[in-house]
Image (cartoon, grey):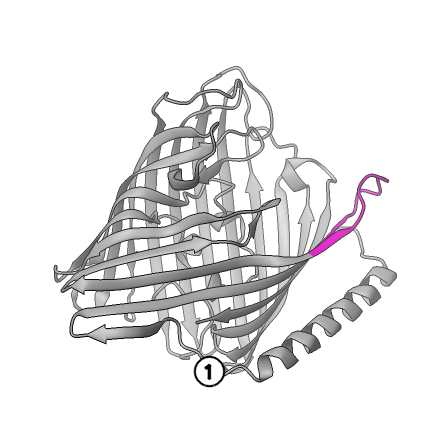
């Protein structure tokens, strides 16, 4: 890893301190908020409104030394995500949530959650519509409850993890106390054709060139010390742990193969993950393997060699509450390997989280060091993420 120059560090400190002070002053007068506000209730009938606001500063500083690789930065809304949830009949719930923030290079308005839910069974919930596919512990952890500003390889839909998908989704538990929980989905899922990524997207917002297909999979999680949900950071300071496994298979239905040399024919995914919470310590680890084949079995480009690849992601992320419930320091190590990479793409993440009202109102800083980005030797990049979050 190459050292950052001193002038950059000085400027970074100035930008960060100014941003934190300004945002902290803004949030100091904000009242305590809970996630979701019930605006109407009459027996089994209710309407709930909520959302999240994530204002983010992102800077990229390449280390390659090329005149074309200049430091860039921007301030934008990473997520502006309101939702409406309600019921007019006992055990039946409807929810829709949309996104107006920036994903990738463009701001977009897109559908996130949009489903009908039935809660009348004792051990299982049934959802029909657009909902999170039960794969990747990190992806299933809401963006508002993560330790790092941005996900690691293990939770990134750009690198094999399915996004929200349109279909039938079941989740529930087997034993009293939810010591064993599970999820199962059969849905429509799309892939944005690319040789450099394995980019799953929801079929609700699909572009005209997306590969269409069907995905089936599920997961099982064991919680030996009592149920632990998908949330990072140890506020309760109780011993909890989880071990999970998951798998899926996706197949192209051949309806929309229009990107020669980039169309994906099939993907199989496997996950093993774990989590530990104890006395202010929060650790999550995950390993994913994706076996992907292109329609063109001669193509060698990006992650693919002769039209196929084993894409391997793993990460370990830890945090410790140095001031319980208020200040957390975090660190992570992650890497990615693919059949056509020159070298493994490695990342080190360092950060700090300041909780004003737990996850409802918080400030986050993550500094990410990339080595061999995209599997290219000596293609190094440093990134800074600063994010302010308000959830209601």
Q: Is residue 50 visible from the viewing direction of this image?
A: yes
For the point 15% across and 62% down, the residue is 91
Residue nearest the observer in this picture, 222 or 215: 215
Q: Main secondary structure of the magenta part?
A: loop
For the point 38% across and 78% down, the residue is 238
Q: Is 210 placed above or below 255 here?
A: below
The number of callouts visible is 1
Residue nearest the observer in this picture, 106 or 214: 106
Q: Is 210 placed above or below 10 here?
A: above
Q: Is residue 142 visible from the viewing direction of this image?
A: no
Stretch in magenta: 60-74
Measured as percent of width and height from the top left, residue 244 is found at: 34, 54
- Side of 188 where 376 appears, left or right: right
Measured as percent of width and height from the top left, residue 100 is found at: 51, 54
Q: Is 181 placed above or below 377 here?
A: below
**Residue 365 falls in which quadrant of the image?**
bottom right
Which residue corresponds to mark 1? 32
Q: For the C terminus, which image quadrant? A: bottom left
């Amino acid at each position: 890893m190459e050292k950052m120059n001193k002038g950059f560090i000085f400027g970074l400190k100035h930008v960060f301190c100014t941003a934190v002070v300004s945002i902290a002053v803004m949030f100091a007068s904000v009242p305590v908020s809970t996630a979701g506000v019930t605006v109407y209730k009459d027996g089994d009938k209710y309407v709930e409104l909520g959302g999240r606001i994530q204002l983010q500063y992102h800077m990229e500083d390449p280390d390659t030394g090329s005149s074309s690789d200049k430091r860039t930065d921007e301030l934008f809304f990473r997520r502006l995500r309101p939702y409406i949830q309600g019921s007019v009949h006992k055990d039946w719930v409807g929810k829709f949530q949309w996104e107006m923030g920036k994903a990738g290079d463009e701001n977009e308005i897109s559908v996130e959650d949009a489903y009908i839910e039935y809660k009348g069974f004792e051990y299982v919930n049934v959802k029909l519509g657009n909902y999170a596919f039960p794969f990747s512990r990190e992806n299933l952890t809401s963006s508002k409850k993560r330790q790092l500003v941005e996900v690691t390889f293990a939770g990134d839909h750009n690198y094999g993890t399915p996004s929200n998908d349109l279909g039938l989704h079941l989740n529930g538990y087997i034993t009293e106390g939810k010591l064993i929980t599970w999820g199962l989905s059969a849905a429509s899922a799309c892939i944005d054709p690319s040789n450099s990524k394995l980019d799953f997207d929801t079929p609700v917002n699909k572009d005209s060139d997306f590969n269409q297909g069907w995905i089936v999979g599920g997961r099982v999680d064991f919680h030996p010390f009592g149920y632990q949900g998908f949330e990072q950071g140890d506020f309760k300071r109780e011993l909890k742990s989880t071990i999970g496994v998951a798998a899926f298979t996706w197949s192209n239905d051949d309806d929309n193969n229009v990107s020669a040399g980039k169309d994906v024919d099939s993907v199989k995914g496997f996950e093993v993950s774990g989590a530990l919470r104890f006395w202010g310590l929060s650790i999550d680890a995950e390993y994913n393997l994706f076996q992907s084949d292109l329609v063109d079995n001669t193509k060698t480009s990006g992650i693919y060699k002769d039209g196929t690849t084993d894409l391997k992601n793993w990460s370990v992320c830890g945090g410790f509450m140095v001031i319980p419930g208020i200040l957390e320091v975090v660190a992570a190590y992650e890497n990615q390997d693919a059949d056509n990479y020159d070298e493994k793409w490695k990342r080190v993440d360092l950060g700090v989280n300041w909780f004003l009202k737990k996850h409802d109102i918080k400030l986050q800083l993550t500094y990410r060091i990339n080595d061999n980005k995209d599997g290219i030797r000596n293609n190094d990049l440093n990134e800074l993420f600063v994010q302010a979050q308000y959830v209601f």
